Image (spheres, rainbow, N blue to C red):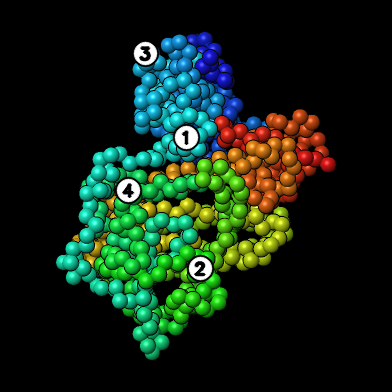
Amino acid sequence: MGKKRKQNSSRGGDSSRERRRKQHKAEKAATKVEGIVSMNRDGLGFITTKEYPESIFVGVNKMRGALNGDRVKVGVYHRTRNGRLEGEIICVLERSHRPHIGTLLVRGNKVWAIVESRSMPYDIRIQVASPDALPTIGGIKAEDGVKVAVLVTEWPKGVPEPLGKIVDVLGRPGENDTEMHSILAEYELPYRFEPEVEAAADKISEKIPEAEIARRKDFRAVTTFTIDPADAKDFDDALSFRDLGGGRYEVGIHIADVTFYVRPGSPVDKEAYARGTSVYLVDRTVPMLPEKLCNKLCSLRPGEDKLCYSAVFEMDDKAKVHKSWFGRTVINSDQRFDYEQAQEILESHRGPLAAELCKLHELADILRKKRFEAGAISFERPEMKVLVDEAGKPIDVIRKESHESNWLIEEFMLLANRGVAETVAKNCTAKNPTFVYRVHDNPNPEKIEELRRFAHNFKQEMGDTSNPKRIAKSLNELMGRIKGKPEENAVQMMALRSMARACYSTDNIGHYGLAFAYYTHFTSPIRRYPDMIAHRLLDLYLGGASSQDKAYYEECCKHASDREQLATEAERASVKYKMIEFMQDKVGQEFDGEISGLTEWGIYVEILPTHIEGMISLRDIQDDYLAFDAENYKTVSHATGKSYTLGDRVRVRVLRASLEQKLLDFELVTE
């Protein structure tokens, strides 16, 4: 049966008089605020608001039909003895637009989506007259046992479960494509192009008109190459190098001229804007642009004439920029390197274009040192990669290695992005020109003080934090001192939490983490829509145009930032899914790990060496009572007084690995 798995007494169990009494009590609460619901598998709510630094706890019988992601009005009552802020939801202001993923259960004329999620403890009744009325989407029929994406539309009083409608049909559970499509659907991300978009892309001519080449600066005779991951299919940036003599060098950063092919308002452009970004799941890339553009027309493949938008710098041996030029070009790449090939050449000083690569490496190294001297922040948390076979099955989890060849490309991309932003802000004729900046705000002083207190627990002291530049210096010094020590991972995590999130904005506040006063995204228009906007605006301003509509471009920035966040969450979800799949045959095995997070409901642990994260549920601990101390950020045992905090080493046993709920549960192994 499609019954709800948790009894929500605030929906069907209260009398009308009792409901009115509770409603009146909520409305009389001392403080009423708006917030977003985070719900756990038990149906408990945790409301995030602007007014309070911590979440507001709401019990199951006070949720009033609110679900994960909903925007609600909540009445805040009091703090409990352990300091927890509690309240009651007054009403749902707006239902979440994020779909829930479930498996259809058809019984007679009734249909439910059985949702297995740690944030959705209820099944959803599908509003259809009969199973015959279930939709077919993407060529797949919605029927019993098929996975679907469902949007909750309402939850009337007295109805035992929320009501919803099917917005996508994903396939049979357990199949790799179904599960990856489920992740994309959950985060409102597309996984296919509509036929009209593909058709519009197919109509774009592959032939470059001679008249177009004549209008551009010709770099086809200049040594040019690309460096990308070994498995890359699109190459949207290239470097050119020319020794000008007298200790001067010309370095060109050439970016695929996507906007030549994708015109504003075209079907391809509208779809690219809607997507905002390419999405990189464990086993696939979901591109922002159709394949003809990203893998053919706009891919800077060796031996082919390609149209670019370029940033060209004249530099000396100390990497000082003496001249810069920005404009449209045509190139022909001489060589395609992957990072490993380029690294081997940098180490051996032998191989194709060895002299050019080594000189560029020298310049990049100077640029990198200058950046950190100016206050750029360095976090070097291990980044893990899940290796999968052809069927998408995970076969290993390894650490991603970053080489000098990665840094070489990174520094010149940063130079181009900074150069474009600074040129628009300072050197164009338009007054106060509207532009799309990539911004990163200063750290929150309160969070920096939390970090100071946390580091002190490990006998690590932070230096001067009286202004943003000194914070950066103190952070880098702290990161240097803890490198290789047991507390490194924990302190780095807390430091990352003290940082603001980078985003797009027409209001330039600089980029704190990079220590740049001006910064944009210009170098990846194949995979990021803001880069396409930057190309178009730069072209307008170089042509003498006046400032463009700020309100319009600010809305573009907000949309792009939102899409980027969704893509990031989906990418993390795909990694987590494959890591849980990797752990399925390891249930019962024990591992050493480090505590990576603490909440009211559990202790998160990353096992070593794979850094796969699971949770020790506090409610599963039978012989003790553990409570989360939010003020001191630790979890304390009632029986022994032992405390657990970030970075502590613990021994865990794998309790369960549920792909349906995307949960990896550990139990604490005590001596």
Q: How many marks?
A: 4
Asked if disc 2 and disc 4 are in contact, CB closer than 8 Å, the reply is no
Q: Answer with mark 1 or mark 3, whichever residue precedes in sequence.
A: 3
Label disc, if present, on residue 341 of the rendered structure: 2
Q: Nearer the viewer, mark 3 or mark 2?
A: 2
655 lies left or right of 26: right
The C terminus: image quadrant = top right
Q: Answer with mark 4 or mark 3, whichever residue precedes in sequence.
A: 3
- Measured as percent of width and height from the top left, residue 250 is found at 36, 79
Q: Residues within 10 Å of mark 3 (few under 14, many from 20)?
A: few
**Picture residue at 35% right of the left edge, 17% below the top:** 133
**Picture residue at 55% right of the left edge, 77% below the top:** 348
23 lies left or right of 489: left
- Measured as percent of width and height from the top left, residue 231 is found at 47, 56
Mark 4: which secondary structure? loop
Q: List the residue tagged with mark 1.
A: 178
Q: Is residue 551 above or below residue 488?
A: above
